[in-house]
Image (cartoon, rainbow, N blue to C red):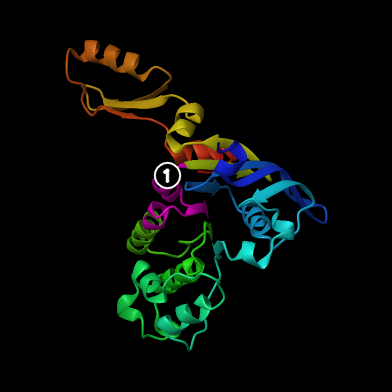
Amino acid sequence: MTTHAEELAVDVRGLRKRYGDVTAVDGVDLGIRRGEVFGLLGPNGAGKSTTVEILQGNRARDGGEVTVLGADPATGTRAWRSRIGIVWQDESAPAELTVRETVRHFARYYPRPRDPEEVVALVGLEARADSRVKALSGGQRRRLDVALGVIGGPELLLLDEPTTGFDPAARRRFWDLIRKLAGEGTTILLTTHYLEEAETLADRLAVVARGRVVAEGEPAALRERFGTGATVEWTEADGTPRSEHTETPTRTVAGLALRFDGEIPGLTVTRPTLEDVYLRLTGQETAR
């Protein structure tokens, strides 16, 4: 029988990390199931990157219990590290090598790497396989970074702000790539500032503020739980636009329908978005 612990790729309890007088991570709890895409959201300085570094075994923690793929990252072996892929914000490959040469080179670091040609195709760089890295566009370099993150056939892929600087078309192509990897069964932890990206890709989300998890759940559930009311907008008979924020939008619309005796001019009902919820949870609601 599979235990709850065995179902989790990442199990974090009471994680803490300080830098001098600054508390970066202040008692974070996380449970990431095997095979899911998990989004970690929060403003700059919330502790996201520090948490990812600790999960990878790249940074020591000050307190708490952490298990990643069944092991403590603080004592993870080389074999354990080979089961984890990571893509940092500022990662870059050797500029003078070609895409194919770079992927083949990194494949040698792993005991059971994926086929380099298959990985180049997976990230959509077949047409640039013989191009030097320095000749790639920003979006193509980011795809190469992902190729290097998955060449080892990782069970867990850590993506730290992977689409920063992408144009909208490149971002959507990257989303297709992440969906493909998730479909293959890779567990993915994604940190991002883009709320649409998180809502599109993540099975579940955690919102971090001031080093703590302030909310966790499926995107739709977070909107339902922390989104308050709806805004009803309409146009009066004299052309004056009106709006009302209400906890009972259906009742408001029904009342308007009676008053207008049928169709309500310019009617819209807008419910809180994930961005609205995120700003509220992180204390940035008034900064919009």
| Residue extending furthest toward the left | 262
Camera sees residue 73: yes
Residue at 62 percent of width and 40 percent of height = 5
Q: Nearer the viewer, residue 35 or 286?
A: 35
Residue beneath disc 1: 199
71 sits left or right of 203 in the view: right
Q: What are the residue bounds of the magenta stretch?
A: 180-203
Q: Nearer the viewer, residue 222 or 74?
A: 74
Residue 8's image quarter? top right
Camera sees residue 191: no
Q: Where's residue 105, x and y in %?
A: 51, 82
Q: Where's residue 186, x and y in %?
A: 46, 55
72 sits left or right of 98 in the view: right
Number of callouts: 1
Amino acid residing under circle 1: Glu
Q: Residues within 10 Å of mark 1 (few under 14, many from 20)?
A: some
Q: Nearer the viewer, residue 127 or 10?
A: 10
Instruction: Check the image and report above or below for 191 versus 255.
Output: below
Q: Is residue 104 magenta?
A: no
Residue 253's image quarter? top left
Residue at 42 percent of width and 73 percent of height = 138
Q: Quadrant of the N terminus?
A: top right
Q: Where's residue 147, x and y in %?
A: 45, 70
Q: Is residue 194 magenta?
A: yes
| SS category of the residue bearing label 1 | helix
Q: Where's residue 149, x and y in %?
A: 51, 67
58 sits left or right of 261 in the view: right
Q: Nearer the viewer, residue 141 or 1?
A: 1
